[in-house]
Amino acid sequence: MKEAERGEAALKCASILEKEGAEFYERASKVAADPRARSLFHVMAESKLEAFRILSKELRELAGGPPLVREDELDEGPTDDLPQVPRIYAVNTLVTAACYVCGEEVPVDALPRECPSCGASRYTFERDIDVKRAATIVQEDENRCLDFYREHVGRVSGGARQLLERLIQRSEARLRDL
Ligand SMILES: [Zn+2]
């Protein structure tokens, strides 16, 4: 069952990674000042959320359904190389935004219309990220995601491998569209 364990662990990592990406891009889309940067981050957030949903569904089915890989695909490979979720998305840097005028911090997930402390408009919480910078952030983060998926796709088989291959194709398509 080691092969199956490795496959399931890789998919779990992938689902965490896609969820973190969705959260990061969603928050980035709220604080970027440039509308084109906001739009790019928003598209990425939607794409990551969709990938996360696909992975969650597969993992739920795995929990109650048939095995991830067929008996004849099982091998006795080592389990000490179970994947760890790489730290790619700087989600923690986007939890709060500070008012440019008075320094008041507010949660990015619930940005107020105006600063609750000094009354400045919500623009005061935005960050100066233009579309070029946004594209660079996306490119760097997605390439690191791809590195992770490419590293693990060769170590798993069956359904897990097919899903990772799908994720790689999705990421490559996203990067092509930049
Ligand atoms: Zn303020």
Image: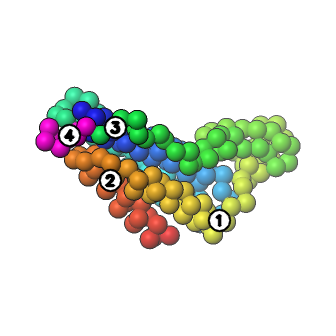
Q: Earlier in the sequence, mark 4 or mark 2?
A: 4
Q: Quadrant of the N terminus?
A: top left
Q: Which residue is pictured at 74% across the width and 49% down the height? A: 125
Foreground label between 4 and 3: 3
Q: Are marks 4 and 2 in contact (CB under 8 Å)?
A: no
Gap between marks 4 and 1 measured at Cα: 45 Å
Instruction: Check residue 71 in the rendering and tell me which mark sits there, or answer none.
Output: none
Tag 3 or tag 2, which sits nearer the N-term? Answer: 3
Magenta part of the chain = 68-76
Q: Residue at x 26, y 52 (%)?
A: 162
User: How far apart in space, not on screen, are marks 2 and 3 (Cα)?
Assistant: 14 Å
- Give the left or right position of residue 116, taking residue 59 as reference: right
For marks 4 and 1 on the same chain, the one whose residue lies earlier in the sequence: 4
**Membership of 72 in magenta stretch:** yes
Specify how the rendered protein is coloured. rainbow
Please say if 167 is above or below 92: below
Query: Looking at numbered disc 3 in the image, what kind of residue is underneath it?
Result: Pro
Assess mark 3: CB under 8 A from ligand 1?
A: no
> Which residue is more in the foreground, 16 or 35?
16
| Residue at the outermost top position | 64
Count residues near mark 3 (Cα–Cα under 10 Å), then give few for <14, some for 14-19, many for 20+: few
Marks 4, 1: nearer the viewer: 4
Camera-nearest residue between 5 and 38 = 5
Taking the spot 22% from the left edge, 40% from the top edge, the residue there is 75
| Badge 2 density bin: few <14, some 14–19, many ≥20, Cα 10 Å | few
Q: Position of residue 94 (x, y in %)?
A: 65, 45
Residue drawn at x 76%, y 38% as measured from the top left = 105
Q: Which residue is mark 4?
A: 74
Task: Report the amino acid beneath label 2.
Answer: Gly
Element assignment for label 4: loop
Contact flag, marks 3 and 1 (Cβ < 8 Å) = no
Can the viewer see residue 164 in this picture?
no
